Image: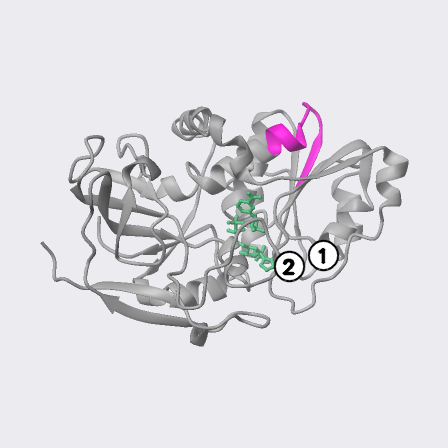
């Protein structure tokens, strides 16, 4: 057995605005032991996701916040170290919601086996995990793209956005991505095959959308909200669908903006707007995952990971993500595979 120390990050204080490293506390405890029906998991990869900012806040949301002193929530891919359940054996790789810690005990029923033969195990937190399923089901079930449609996605080089654009292309649509640097735009239009890209930090987004989408926007997959979304709404096509996936531009504002204001665009175009959470499609995730795995194998879906080394750097990584520092799916390598 390893040295009997489990390092964890706990929430120390609730941020007002952007989180700071002082909002997190690095604590040490003995490694827990599983009881009947439980497994002990050693974290190999910890996922960094924008929803974690929401869990740090007491603002009303779809789920309860992390209490002060509680372990930061998060999905991990890890190795089973000890099992008190017939369904798992030591050495197996699992995806579970362990939180920001090196070891954790979870009920066996709450862990999902990861097959290392399908793709690198880290993808169970990205393209084959929660963000990939968000992109897949959000686009197909909420955006409902038709061949020939123009699909616009914001935060387009990220874990969710990059998959949205590529799936849109597979569905026979034009994909237009909005992101925050020329390097990110070069990646989505070059390597990922998006038809056009807009750098919202250097371009007039309203004018650029007009140019990139001359027939209007049929599907807008919104990851950011705020001024970018206002600009896209000005260009909705007849019967457009707007899928509200995320509002990251608002997560760190002490007083979030009350956009969008241009609801007339929905009236005149008879367009629809629908928010969704990935869990709504949980019963179908396995099927989505299989299809995505096939597309990866065929080279039709590519992915990029942004790896930060060491649990101790998790707070810095999450804070960086809120400023667009990540380029691709953000992961913390907690322990060597
Ligand atoms: P990500 O795109 O890999 O990383 C977040 C990106 O957001 C940053 O890299 C940055 O890219 C962009 N960003 C940060 N601050 C911004 C701002 N003020 N304005 C515009 N863009 C900003 O993250 P992800 O995991 O794929 O998540 C993307 C969105 O999906 C998030 O809003 C998240 O909350 C949401 N989400 C929703 C669900 C659901 O079930 N509905 C599930 C997963 C994720 P740039 O450099 O391009 O600005």
Q: Which residue is mark 1?
A: 226
Element assignment for label 1: helix
Q: Earlier in the sequence, mark 1 or mark 2?
A: 1
Q: Is mark 1 within 8 Å of ligand 1?
A: yes
Magenta span contains residue 197: no
Tell me how many marks there are: 2
Q: Is 326 above or below relative to 299?
A: below
Picture quadrant of residue 122: top left
Q: Is mark 2 within 8 Å of ligand 1?
A: yes
Where are the magenta residues, as a range? 139-152
Q: Is 230 above or below relative to 138?
A: below
Nearest the viewer among 14 and 268 is: 14
The percent coordinates of residue 38 (x first, y second) are 24, 42
Residue found at the far bottom of this picture: 22
Q: Which residue is mark 2?
A: 249
Q: Are marks 1 and 2 in contact (CB under 8 Å)?
A: yes
Picture quadrant of residue 334: bottom left
Tell me: 12 left or right of 4: right
Q: Quadrant of the N terminus?
A: bottom left
Measure the alpha-carbon separation of dots 1 and 2.
Answer: 6 Å
């Amino acid at each position: 057995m390893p040295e009997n120390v489990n390092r964890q990050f706990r929430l120390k204080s609730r941020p007002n605005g952007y989180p700071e490293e002082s909002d997190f506390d690095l604590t040490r405890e003995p490694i827990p032991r599983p009881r009947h029906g439980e497994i002990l998991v050693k974290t190999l990869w910890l996922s960094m996701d924008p929803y974690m900012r929401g869990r740090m806040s007491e603002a009303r949301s779809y789920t309860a916040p992390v209490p002060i002193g509680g372990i930061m929530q998060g999905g991990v891919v890890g190795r089973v170290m000890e099992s008190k359940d017939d369904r798992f054996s030591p050495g197996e790789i699992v995806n579970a919601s362990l939180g920001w810690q090196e070891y954790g005990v979870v009920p066996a029923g709450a862990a999902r086996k990861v097959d290392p033969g399908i793709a690198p195990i880290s993808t169970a937190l990205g393209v084959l995990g929660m963000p990939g399923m968000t992109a897949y089901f959000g686009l197909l079930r909420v955006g409902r793209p038709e061949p020939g449609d123009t699909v616009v996605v914001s935060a387009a080089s990220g874990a969710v956005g990059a998959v949205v654009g590529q799936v849109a292309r597979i569905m026979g649509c034009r994909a237009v991505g909005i992101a925050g640097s020329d390097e990110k735009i070069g990646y989505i239009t070059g390597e990922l095959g998006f038809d056009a890209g807009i750098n919202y930090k250097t371009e007039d987004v309203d004018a650029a959308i007009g140019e990139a989408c001359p027939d209007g926007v049929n599907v807008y997959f919104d990851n950011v909200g705020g001024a970018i979304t206002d600009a896209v709404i000005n260009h909705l096509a007849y019967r457009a669908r707007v899928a509200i996936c995320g509002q990251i531009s608002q997560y760190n504002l002490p007083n979030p903006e009350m956009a969008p204001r241009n609801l007339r665009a929905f009236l005149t175009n008879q367009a629809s707007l629908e928010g969704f959470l990935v869990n709504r499609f949980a019963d179908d995730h396995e099927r989505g995952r299989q299809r995505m795995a096939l597309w990866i194998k065929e080279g039709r879906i590519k992915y990029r990971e942004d790896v930060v080394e060491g649990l101790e750097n998790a707070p810095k990584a999450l804070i960086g993500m809120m400023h667009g520092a990540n380029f691709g799916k953000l992961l913390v390598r907690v322990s060597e595979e």
